[in-house]
Amino acid sequence: FDILVTEIQDASQILEFGKKYLKSVGQEGQELSSKECRFSHIDKASLQTEKQIQENGFSIIEIKNCN
């Protein structure tokens, strides 16, 4: 999954967003680090994504076939 934020933030805070997401999908305790990150990119967010970021500080994009 991808963690989207509005601007560059403290990496530890972004990892906490990921842990919060994992807990919400019943995967709490999974190892999570940025070493799996192959690249980052900038793109225009959808209105729904912008709303999620405003409400939560982040948004998650699930990757296809990622269980």
Image (cartoon, rainbow, N blue to C red):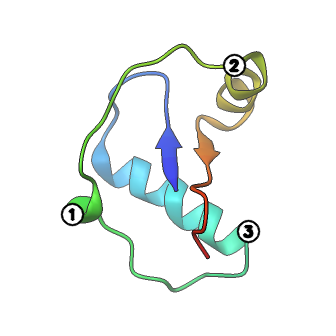
Whole-percent x, y for residue 53 in the image? 65, 29
Q: Position of residue 24 (x, y in %)?
A: 73, 68
User: Does residue 41 sit above or below 66 in this rendering?
Assistant: above
Q: Which residue is mark 1?
A: 35
Q: Earlier in the sequence, mark 2 or mark 1?
A: 1
Query: The C terminus is located in which quarter?
Result: bottom right
Q: Residue at x 68, y 21 (%)?
A: 50
Q: Do residues under tags 2 and 3 come within 8 Å of each other at their CB atoms?
A: no
What is the quadrant of residue 7 in the picture? Answer: top left
Name the one closer to the observer, 66 or 15.
Answer: 66
Q: Specify whether 27 is left or right of 6.
A: right
Q: Nearer the viewer, mark 2 or mark 3?
A: 2
Q: Quadrant of residue 58?
A: top right
Q: Amino acid at mark 3?
A: Ser
Q: Residues within 10 Å of mark 3 (few under 14, many from 20)?
A: few
Tag 3, which secondary structure?
A: helix
In the image shown, does 28 or 46 lie closer to the viewer? Answer: 46
Per the model, the C-alpha gap separating discs 2 and 3 is 22 Å
Q: Which residue is mark 3?
A: 24
